[in-house]
Amino acid sequence: MASSDVKPKSISRAKKWSEEIENLYRFQQAGYRDEIEYKQVKQVAMVDRWPETGYVKKLQRRDNTFYYYNKQRECEDKEVHKVKIYAY
């Protein structure tokens, strides 16, 4: 990621759950498009993840409050269609 203002070229909606969708759901709950935007805004090199599952463990919102997530799946099937997938 050489540029600090990477913008997505296209967007689509998730159709079914996957591990990638789970992590996107967590970033979007915290107010970010995805991991790329989170790292840009917060100037961090790594995101805290659960070692067992690889899911995002903790995110800091733009207002500096923290979101903590469980090891298990949190994005229910009825929420999957709300997740946006950005292409760069």
Image (spheres, rainbow, N blue to C red):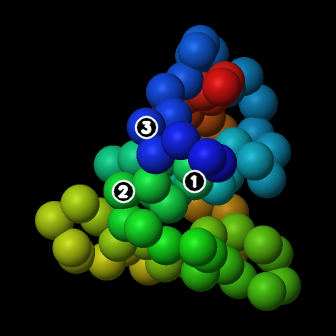
The circle on residue 55 is none
Q: CA–CA distance between discs 1 and 2?
A: 10 Å
Q: Quadrant of residue 21?
A: top right
Q: Residues within 10 Å of mark 1 (few under 14, many from 20)?
A: some
N-terminal-most mark, 1 or 2: 1
Separation of disc 3 and disc 1 at Cα?
A: 13 Å
Residue 71: % across, % down? 67, 79
Residue with the mark numbered 1: 35
Kind of residue sitting beneath label 2: Val
The reply to whether callout 1 and callout 2 are in contact (CB within 8 Å) is: no
Label 1 secondary element: helix
**What's under tag 3, amino acid-wise?**
Asp
Residue that appears at 36% across and 56% down: 41
Q: Earlier in the sequence, mark 2 or mark 3?
A: 3
Q: Nearer the viewer, residue 18 or 10?
A: 10
Q: Where 36 falls versus 57 (above or below)?
A: above
Nearest to the eye among marks 2 and 3: give it: 3
Residue at image point 51% right, 34% down: 6
SS at mark 2 in the image: helix
Residue position marked by numbered label 3 in the rendering: 5
Q: Amino acid at mark 1?
A: Glu
Distance from the alpha carbon under mark 2 to that under mark 3: 10 Å
Residue designated by label 2: 41
Horizontal and vertical percent for residue 3? 53, 41
Q: Residue furthest front?
A: 2
